[in-house]
Image (tube, rainbow, N blue to C red):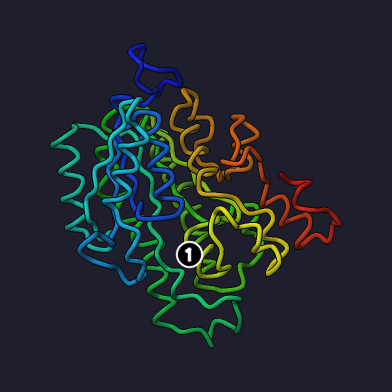
Amino acid sequence: MTATGTGDGRGPLAGRVALVAGATRGAGRAMAVELGRVGAMVYVTGRTTRDHVSEVGRATETIEETAELVTEAGREAGGTGIAVPTDHLVPEQVSALVRRIDTEQGRLDVLVNDVWGGDHLLSFPFSGPMWEQDLAGGLRMLRLGVETHLVTSHHALPLLTRRPGGLLVEVTDGTAESNRRYREHLYYDLAKNAPIRIAFGLAQELGERGCTAVALSPGWLRSEAMLDTHFEVTEETWREGIAKDPHFAISESPVYVARALAALATDPEVARWNGQSLDSGRLAREYGFTDADGSRPDAWGYIADVVYGGREASAEDYR
């Protein structure tokens, strides 16, 4: 993939095709939009549409709206969004999705496995040992956060590997380093560590075919649900949430991890990251981008040093 434009005013990913699996909201939506902004044709999938609401229960966030945002962002760069309702736990639907991409585009250059949708199965703060947690809810979490990724990769990677240079991104919460600390909820811990291992394993297989696999994590993500459900704020007023939890000061908008993805997707030397577990803060330092407010938060560094390490420092020291 080239990091420069096409020479005709289009973006660096013009002519390239991406699939963002799980693009209804949060990081997935932002990543789809950013790929469109740099010129990609982006297929966006999810279960919530204008006619159907998934078990997550957030009717105002739909894949149709995501596709429209992608097209709007990509207007000058040549990017376009295409919404395809897909339940990634249903292999037949994923297979049909990939066949459609193959028929319409004949290629797939970037696959982003961002499917999650398990927050409603968690209680905050996490509490109680595994045997006191809801078993059905925990197993559902693993299906949503792990099985969906495996199903999607099984069907999409044959198309991705048709050409060298393809990029697989496993989106998760935490890095291999930060997740050495137990995430305090066994099912959540498993669901968020599995994509890291998936990326590590697939890196061996994709690397042999000239492609790249990485795991990518935001820091403390200000998703729509985090803002309005947990802190009762908006993106414009998010700093009011610091009164509820001082550590919220290190949080970042979805734009930050989206810019991290775009940096990877437009890096002609992206193969140097093959198999690695990456995060938005680390990639910001590497590629020089910032969050939407111009800051450069290092959430996982702050959490390790201040939250768990006892260092006396403010979040501003890590922004």
Q: Residues within 10 Å of mark 1 (few under 14, many from 20)?
A: some
Q: Is residue 289 left or right of residue 264?
A: right
Residue lying at the far right of the rendered structure: 312
Identify the secondary structure beneath mark 1.
helix
Residues 97 and 158: in front is: 97
Quadrant in the picture for residue 245:
bottom right
Q: Residue at x 23, y 57 (%)?
A: 86
Residue lying at the far bottom of the rendered structure: 132
Quadrant in the picture for residue 293:
top right
Residue lying at the far left of the rendered structure: 103
Quadrant in the picture for residue 108:
top left
Q: Residue at x 65, y 34 (%)?
A: 285
Q: Quadrant of the N terminus?
A: top left
The percent position of residue 259, horizontal first and vertical second, equals: 51, 37
The percent position of residue 99, horizontal first and vertical second, equals: 16, 44
Q: Residue at x 25, y 59 (%)?
A: 49
Q: Is residue 2 left or right of residue 123?
A: left
Which residue is identified by label 1?
Answer: 225
Amino acid at circle 1: Ala
Count of labels in the image: 1
* Residue 69 to residue 50: above or below: above
Q: Is residue 91 left or right of residue 313?
A: left
Q: Is residue 153 left or right of residue 299?
A: left
Residue lying at the far top of the rendered structure: 7
* Residue 203 to residue 89: above or below: above
Q: Residue at x 39, y 36 (%)?
A: 35
The percent position of residue 79, horizontal first and vertical second, equals: 31, 31
Q: Quadrant of the C terminus?
A: top right
Residues 169 and 31: in front is: 31
